C-alpha cells in the first residue's frame, strides 16, 4: 500500500519535472563543438533572432581573421518565474574573440541592443550605429549602474553614406523607416562580395518625420551587386503594403478636436513619430502634453536632444501639474498599451497610479495592436478600462469606436519585401529575424521574385552558413540558446528557475528535527510550510505528520556519520511526501533539516530555526 503511494508521488513529481524540462529545453543551449571557419569563405552565424517573433537578434559575420557582430538584442516576455529577459548564449564568441572588430547595430529597439550590456564587456569591441541608435545604446550602459564598463560607441553618418573599415569589412548604414528614429539597414562589403542586413524596416513613402527609407541608395548598392540579402521576416504573412504612417495624423487631430475630457494615449515608448503626431495635435488644439512612463521619458529626452522630436515651447508640462490643468486642456502620453504589468496605463487601470485617477469623461486611446503573446493582457486592460466607464479608442476596434486608424506596423508587408529584393537584386537570400514560419513565407516571396530555390538559405539559431562568392551552403552548428536574466540584470542559473517552477504549484515544506547523536529526538519536529496548505486549518494533519516523523526517527540507531544523517534525510523526504500526498494530493518540495547534538553538546547545524506559523 505504502509503496503504491510512494510510486504515485514519484510519478506526479516525475510528470512535473518532465513538463518543466520541456519548457526549459526550448531555452537551453545546445552544446556543439564548433569548427573553425574556412578562411576563404564568409561565415554567417545567427546566435539569436531566428525563432519566435525575432527577438534577441544577433548575427556574427566572419572572414579570415576578422569578425563583426550585427545587432545584439534581448528577448522580453519570457514566461518563467522571476525572469525578465533572455540574451543569446555567446559561447561561440570565445573561439573567435581575437577576431571581433566591432558591433554594428541596425536600430535602438531592445531586441536589437538589449544584449550589449552583457556581451560587450566579455568581448570588448567598438559599437557602431546611427546617432539615435548610439544614444539608445549609451543610455543602456548608463542605466546599468553596477556595470562600470565604458563602451566605445561610434556614430556612423548614414545620410552621408559614411563607410567604416572594420578589418577586412567595410560597413555602411542605409536609412530605413521603422518605428524608432534613425533605423538602418547594415551593408557589409566583404572581400568576396556585398552583404546587406535590412534590420527592421518598412518602405513607407510618407513617414511623419519625412525621412523615408533611402531606396535610391539601396538601388545603387543593388546595381553595383549584392551577394546576399539578409532580410527581416516579421510581416511576411501580410498582403500588400503596410499603410503609411501619415494616415494616422488625421485620426489624432480629429480625436483631440472632438474630445471634451482628458485624453490618455498609450503608445510604444520608442515610437517618437507617434509622440510627435500627438504633440502636433495637442499644440494645434491648445492642449498641454504630459509624458508618463520612465522608458518613454528617457527616449523622448534623447529624441529632443538629437532633434528627432520637436516639442513647441510651453506644450510639455510635468506630471505634478496634471491636476492644475482643465480636463479639456491636457493629453497624457503614456506607456502600457500592451497591458504590461507595472506600466503607466496598467497602474491607471488598477487605480494605483500616483497622480491620475481615471474617471467618467476621460478618453483612453490605445495606439497599438497586441504583439503576439500579449493578446490576453491587451484585452484585459480594455476590460478594466470599460469597468471604469472611460471612453476607449483602440486600433483594432477603431471603426466601431468612432475614430480613424490609430496604429500602423513598423514592419513592411509582402509587397515591401518583394520591393526590397527588387531594389537590392541579391544573388542569395537569407530570411532573418523571425521564427521558421514567417521565414518560410519570406522564402516564398523570394521564389516569386525570381530567386532560385538553391539560392535561398534557411537557418536557425546556431546554424551557420558559408559563402564563397558563387555558392551558399548550410555548413554546421555552433552552440546557441538563451541565458535567463532577472529584474536586476543578474543571470539566473537553470537550477534556480527549475526550483521556482517546482515551487509554483505545490509550495514547500521544511521539517526541522533536533536529534541526539544516539538517535533520540530531543524536541517535537518543527514543520514550516509556504504555498502549500494553511497551517492553522490543518493542525490535525500536521500533528499526524509529526507522529510519522517521530516513529521514523525512533527506528534509527546512532546518527554518528554524515552518511547516516543523509540516509535519515532521504527517508524523511519520502515519508513526508507520501503522507502529504495521501491527504492533499499535492507534492510540495520537502526539505528536511536535521540538527544532531553531539556527545559534548555541539550541533552540526546552527542556529536552530524557530518554529514557523502563519
Ligand atoms: Zn525594431
Image (tube, rainbow, N blue to C red):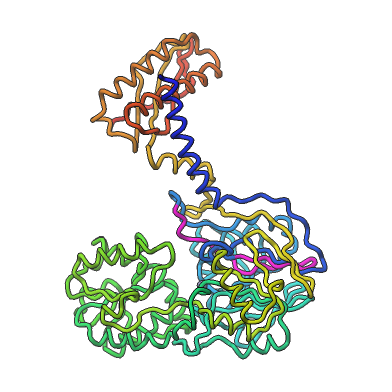
In the image, residue 515 sits, relative to residue 20, either above or below, namely: above
Tell which residue pokes out farthest to the left in this image. Answer: 360
Question: Is residue 136 magenta-colored?
Answer: no
Question: Residue 600, image x and y in percent?
Answer: 48, 11
57 to the left or right of 363: right
User: Residue 604 at what x, y percent from top left?
Assistant: 49, 20
> Measuring 45% from the left and 39% from the top, which residue is drawn there?
16
Question: Quadrant location of the C terminus?
Answer: top left
| Image quadrant occupied by the N terminus | top left
Could you say which is closer to the camera, residue 284 or residue 5? 5
Find residue 291 and report its image quarter: bottom left
At x 48%, y 35%, the residue is 14
Q: Is residue 113 above or below residue 538?
A: below
Work out which residue is located at the far right of the displayed protein and give it. 40
Number of marks present in the image shown: 0
Identify whether 213 is placed above or below 333: below
Give the image location of residue 545, x and y in percent: 34, 21
Say if residue 555 shows up in the picture: yes
Q: Is residue 106 visible?
A: no
Residue range in magenta is 58-79
Is 78 one of the magenta-colored residues? yes
Q: How far from the left and from the top, in percent, is residue 498?
A: 49, 42
Amino acid at each position: 500500500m505504502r509503496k503504491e503511494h510512494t510510486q504515485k508521488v514519484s510519478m506526479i513529481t516525475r510528470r512535473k519535472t518532465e513538463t518543466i524540462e520541456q519548457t526549459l529545453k526550448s531555452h537551453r543551449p545546445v552544446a556543439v563543438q564548433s569548427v573553425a571557419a574556412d578562411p576563404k569563405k564568409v561565415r554567417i552565424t545567427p546566435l539569436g533572432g531566428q525563432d519566435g517573433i525575432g527577438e534577441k537578434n544577433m548575427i556574427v559575420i566572419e572572414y579570415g581573421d576578422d569578425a563583426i557582430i550585427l545587432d545584439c538584442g534581448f528577448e522580453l516576455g519570457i514566461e518563467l518565474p522571476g525572469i525578465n529577459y533572455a540574451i543569446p548564449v555567446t559561447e561561440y564568441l570565445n573561439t573567435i574573440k581575437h577576431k571581433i572588430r566591432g558591433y554594428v547595430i541596425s536600430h535602438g529597439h531592445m531586441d536589437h541592443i538589449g544584449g550589449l550590456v552583457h556581451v560587450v564587456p566579455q568581448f570588448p569591441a567598438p559599437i557602431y550605429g546611427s546617432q539615435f541608435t548610439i544614444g539608445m545604446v549609451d543610455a543602456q550602459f548608463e542605466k546599468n549602474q553596477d556595470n562600470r564598463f565604458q563602451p566605445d560607441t561610434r556614430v556612423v553618418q548614414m545620410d552621408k553614406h559614411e563607410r567604416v573599415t572594420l578589418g577586412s569589412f567595410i560597413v555602411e548604414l542605409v536609412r530605413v523607416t521603422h518605428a524608432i528614429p534613425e533605423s538602418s539597414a547594415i551593408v557589409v562589403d566583404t572581400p568576396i562580395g556585398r552583404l546587406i542586413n535590412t534590420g527592421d524596416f518598412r518602405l513607407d513613402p510618407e513617414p511623419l518625420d519625412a525621412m523615408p527609407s533611402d531606396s535610391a541608395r539601396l538601388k545603387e548598392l543593388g546595381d553595383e551587386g549584392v551577394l546576399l540579402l539578409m532580410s527581416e521576416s516579421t510581416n511576411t504573412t501580410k498582403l500588400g503594403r503596410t499603410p503609411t504612417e501619415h494616415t494616422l495624423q488625421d485620426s489624432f487631430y480629429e480625436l483631440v478636436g472632438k474630445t471634451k475630457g482628458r485624453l490618455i494615449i498609450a503608445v510604444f515608448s520608442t515610437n517618437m513619430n507617434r509622440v510627435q503626431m500627438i504633440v502636433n495635435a495637442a499644440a494645434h488644439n491648445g492642449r498641454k502634453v504630459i509624458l508618463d512612463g520612465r522608458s518613454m521619458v528617457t527616449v523622448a529626452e534623447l529624441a529632443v536632444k538629437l532633434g528627432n522630436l520637436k516639442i513647441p515651447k510651453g506644450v510639455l508640462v510635468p506630471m505634478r501639474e496634471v491636476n492644475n490643468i482643465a480636463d479639456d486642456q491636457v493629453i497624457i502620453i503614456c506607456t502600457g498599451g500592451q497591458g504590461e504589468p507595472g506600466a503607466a496605463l496598467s497602474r491607471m487601470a488598477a487605480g494605483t497610479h500616483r497622480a491620475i485617477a481615471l474617471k467618467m469623461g476621460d478618453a483612453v486611446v490605445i495606439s497599438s495592436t497586441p504583439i503576439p503573446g500579449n493578446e490576453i493582457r491587451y484585452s484585459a486592460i480594455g476590460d478594466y478600462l470599460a469597468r471604469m466607464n472611460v471612453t476607449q479608442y483602440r486600433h483594432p476596434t477603431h471603426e466601431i469606436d468612432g475614430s480613424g486608424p490609430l496604429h500602423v506596423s513598423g514592419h513592411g508587408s509582402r509587397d515591401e519585401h518583394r520591393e526590397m529584393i527588387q531594389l537590392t537584386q541579391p544573388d542569395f537570400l537569407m530570411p532573418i529575424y523571425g521564427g521558421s514560419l514567417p521565414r518560410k513565407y519570406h522564402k516564398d516571396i523570394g521564389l516569386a521574385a525570381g530567386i532560385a530555390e538553391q539560392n535561398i538559405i534557411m537557418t536557425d539559431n546556431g546554424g551557420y552558413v558559408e559563402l564563397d562568392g558563387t555558392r551558399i551552403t548550410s555548413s554546421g552548428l555552433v552552440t546557441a540558446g538563451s541565458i535567463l536574466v532577472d529584474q536586476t540584470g543578474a543571470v539566473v542559473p537553470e537550477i534556480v528557475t527549475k526550483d521556482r517552477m517546482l515551487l509554483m504549484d505545490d509550495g514547500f515544506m521544511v521539517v526541522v528535527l533536533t536529534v541526539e547523536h544516539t538517535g533520540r529526538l530531543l524536541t517535537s519536529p518543527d514543520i514550516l510550510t509556504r504555498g502549500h496548505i494553511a497551517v492553522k486549518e490543518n493542525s490535525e494533519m500536521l500533528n499526524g505528520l509529526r507522529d510519522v516523523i517521530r516513529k521514523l526517527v525512533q527506528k534509527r540507531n546512532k546518527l554518528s556519520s554524515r552518511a547516516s544523517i543523509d540516509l535519515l534525510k532521504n527517508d524523511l523526504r519520502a515519508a513526508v511526501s507520501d503522507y502529504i500526498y495521501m491527504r492533499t494530493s499535492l507534492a510540495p518540495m520537502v526539505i528536511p533539516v536535521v540538527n544532531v547534538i553531539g556527545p559534548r553538546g555541539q550541533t552540526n547545524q546552527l542556529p536552530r530555526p524557530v518554529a514557523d506559523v502563519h
